[in-house]
Every structure is written in structure tokens, then in C-alpha cells.
Amino acid sequence: MGSAAGSSMDTSTETPEIGTIGMGLEVVTLPVSDVDRAKHFYETLGWRTDADIVAGDSFRVVQMTPTRSACSIAFGKGLTTAEPGSAQRLILVVSDIDAARDDFSARGVGVSELFHLDGGPVPGRDPQDRSYQTLATFSDPDGNKWLLQEIKTRLPGREWT
């Protein structure tokens, strides 16, 4: 019958049909404590500044986009009640993780050593050099944590046609 307000109990085993309305994740909001410090950090990564809008004393939004990304980040003042540094596991996909680490290091950004997952994090590159398996991490000045993930070849079904 019905369900309690605010809850859902779909026990169907059928997979819903894939949507036909085009959608794109465009912007992810990050909680930061110091907008200018965060902007400087992401500029250091070489990211494009799309907007820096101030409206009075209680609102500012900065939008920045990683190189060649379809999704941007936004941070500022009056945007979110989330605690600074609470964003975790933001994934940046790169085709060459060694080149990405070298670039970030040359820009003064601390990046972890490479690791892969085998029942948990294991130091070093994936021994079979598989896409999705070799990783590294870095954090912004507030502690928002990013994951670099190397993808050379996408798995079947992972691209929209």
C-alpha cells in the first residue's frame, strides 16, 4: 500500500528505463573558510576562474573549472552550511597520473604517493596497470579531499553516445 511521508519502499526488481532528458552535473559546491585563500589554491592548480561575484557583505561566489572539465566547483560566502573541509572523495580523472602528480608538485601542491586498491589501499601503481585502479590524493587548504584517478580506457557503457 502507501508509505510513510518522506520514505520510499520500492521493492521492484526491474531496472528503470534510462532517462531521455539530457542532464549534466555542472557545478559542485565546496565549503571553505577563506574564499581568497581557496581561490588562490585552485588558481595554483591552473584552473580557470569562471566567475567571482560579490553581492553585499554576506554573499560571494567563485566558480572555477579544472582544465578541460565539464564540471566546475563553486565556493564562497553564503553558499552552503556545510563545514569547511567536509567535502571528501572529489574525483579528478586524469589520463596520466604521473604527469598530473608532477604538474601539481611543480605548482607547490602536495600530492600523495601513488596507491591502488586491493582489499584496501596498497602503495604503488596497480600492478596490472588497469584504468580506474591507480590513485593519489591531495587536499585544499581547508581539508576538502581530492582523489586523482587514472583512466586510460573507460569501461564499456561508461560514455553517453
Image (spheres, rainbow, N blue to C red):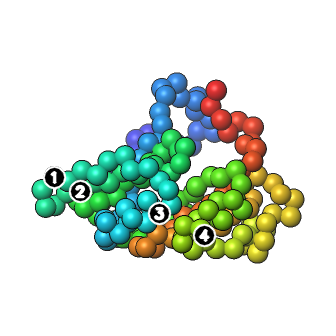
Counting residues from the start of the chain, the first of labels 1 and 3 encountered is: 3
**Are the residues at dot 1 and dot 2 in contact (C-beta closer than 8 Å)?**
yes
Q: Which mark is residue 55?
A: 1
Q: Label 4 sits on what residue type? A: Ser
Residue nearest the observer in this picture, 17 or 144: 144
Q: Is residue 126 left or right of residue 161?
A: right
Residue drawn where x is 51% and y is 70% of the image: 139
**Are the residues at dot 3 and dot 4 in contact (C-beta closer than 8 Å)?**
no
Counting residues from the start of the chain, the first of labels 1 and 2 encountered is: 1
- The residue that mark 2 highlights is 60
**Are the residues at dot 2 and dot 3 in contact (C-beta closer than 8 Å)?**
no
Residue lying at the far right in this picture: please name it.
128
Counting residues from the start of the chain, the first of labels 2 and 3 encountered is: 3
Q: Is residue 115 left or right of residue 61?
A: right
Q: How many marks?
A: 4
Residue lying at the far front in this picture: please name it.
106
- The residue that mark 3 highlights is 44
Q: Label 2 sits on what residue type? A: Arg
Specify few, some or many for label 2: CA neighbours under 10 Å numbering under 14, 14-19, or 20 or more: some
- The residue that mark 4 highlights is 105
Residue drawn where x is 29% and y is 60% of the image: 76
Q: Does residue 4 show up?
A: no
Q: Label 1 sits on what residue type? A: Ala
